[in-house]
Image (cartoon, coloured by chain):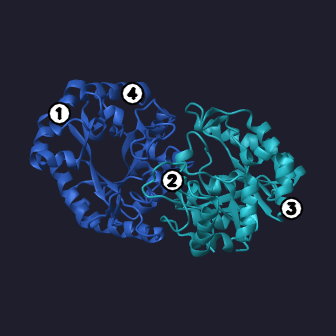
Chain colours: A blue, B cyan
Amino acid sequence: MERLSLNQITVRQWSLAEAVEGCARHGVGAIGLWRDKVAEVGVDEAAALVRRAGLRVSSLCRGGFFTGRGPDGPTGDGVAGTRAALEEAARLGAEVLVLVVGGVAGTDLAGARRRVAEGLEQVVPDALRLGVRLGLEPLHPVTCADRSVLVTLDQALALAAPYPVEAVGVVVDEYHVWWDPRVEEAIAAAGARICGFHACDTLVPLPDPLLGRALPGDGPIDHRRLRACADAAGYAGPIEVEVFNADLWALPGDEALTRTVRAYLDHVA
Amino acid sequence: MERLSLNQITVRQWSLAEAVEGCARHGVGAIGLWRDKVAEVGVDEAAALVRRAGLRVSSLCRGGFFTGRGPDGPTGDGVAGTRAALEEAARLGAEVLVLVVGGVAGTDLAGARRRVAEGLEQVVPDALRLGVRLGLEPLHPVTCADRSVLVTLDQALALAAPYPVEAVGVVVDEYHVWWDPRVEEAIAAAGARICGFHACDTLVPLPDPLLGRALPGDGPIDHRRLRACADAAGYAGPIEVEVFNADLWALPGDEALTRTVRAYLDHVA
């Protein structure tokens, strides 16, 4: 249990206060926060809630969108947005700010990828100053058009390479990278760059690219194998269970968290 | 127009005879056949239809499923099925048999990939004897669980490497590989292995992993750029437009083909 972190999206039906109380009841020692849930109570109150509960904040989701293109169309200035998110992460005591880098406007995929590298360069000094790591998270290629032109761990490692490991890390999310023929080599190569590990399975057939996720054990992903790769690479940090699943969201939060903890213990730990 | 081939799935509303007549009316000189449409008239009649029309048969779809797992669950023996498909391809005068290798049974992705390599090895002698190339087609990672553990061109090239180019080639389908950060290098490395190029765009947001495809120009894919990569690698063969799209299927076949030809000329040729 000591490595389990509850990513807040998994029990989206809960407010931040409810999620914090739930973690205490279920013996979960860390939480991955989402900015919309934080905004509902305000950053200061959110920080006080997790601090009083003694919860480790494994990550804050999310900054990025450096390409200017998100799932709902054009985004604002990704660099400014990421700086604001970094400040928020620091106030919350979050160790990592997860980055979702953005999709393609028009048909210029190479240009979108250049803008990601340029945007990252601009926010690295802020990350170092604030003591929050930027966590580059490759998303599944199915999100390439509208959410993330960053789709493989190899690509994330190349983006991170120019910067110190304490400034830029990579987040390994099983749902997003399990299919990659190079995933095991890439995790090994990542080593100290790994700043997060998200456990999540995939539904078969996939009903929807965003919501087609499942608790560990409910799909084809070999969680212990991928976790062993991360362990062997030296990662000893929190393992967040992060699942977007409408059935899970329809349950009472306590039941959803019970299932989450059980799936983690049975298939990941 | 001289490189355009109509993949039959694009006008699925048409029988084989209707598709052959449609190609003649619209000046399309090549066709990619599907086995279910061939079976409706029988292999001999299908072969006679395309031969009388003077159509080049750029490919037959499909063989494979070496892993034993398909979208509808367990498949039959992939090696036996692929041998039968190779015989059919030879009788039809098809240059290439497209292979969809199959998904993962359980959670043993590495084992599934081994079975693909083992299955391929067994059918290579048949391909050489019959003079039909096996076309390894990497499918989008969104299909990894239930349809294709082969998801990148690099992976296809590694699988093909032990065999002569006339026996095993790779099919570049834009929808399936456009997101890959290594796609341009992989196409260059493929060179004479390239035995097919499928033009197809992707809908944004993706409504469905199978049907979320669009005519070239209706999505974020830069078709001329990818085609130029294949040209530079020495590929001078047919370019199939292969689109699974319910709106296109709901049109009268002639209208669907008119739109297909226009999309090809405007965005690919």
Disc assigned to residue A263: 4
Query: Mark 4 belongs to which amino acid?
Result: Ala
Residue drawn at x 85%, y 50% is B45
Query: Mark 3 belongs to which amino acid?
Result: Arg
Q: Looking at the picture, how far across and down is residue A99, in whole percent?
A: 33, 55
Give the residue number, with chain letter if any, for mark 3: B52
Give the residue number, with chain letter if any, for mark 1: A18
Q: Considering the numbered disc 4 on the image, is that residue within a helix, a strand or a loop?
A: helix
Query: Mark 2 belongs to which amino acid?
Result: Gly
Q: Mark 2 and mark 3, same subunit?
A: yes
Gap in Å between the C-alphas at discs 3 and 4?
60 Å
Look at discs 4 and 1 and give the one toward the viewer: 1
Give the residue number, with chain letter if any, for mark 2: B212
- Report whether A8 appears left or right of B226: left
Gap in Å between the C-alphas at discs 1 and 3?
72 Å
Query: Mark 1 belongs to which amino acid?
Result: Glu
If the image is split into quadrants, where does the N terminus of chain B sit?
bottom right
Look at discs 4 and 2 and give the one toward the viewer: 2
Chain letter for mark 3: B
Chain letter for mark 2: B
Q: Residue furthest right?
A: B129
**The quadrant where residue B77 appears:** top right
Q: Looking at the picture, how far across and down is residue B14, in whole percent?
A: 68, 54
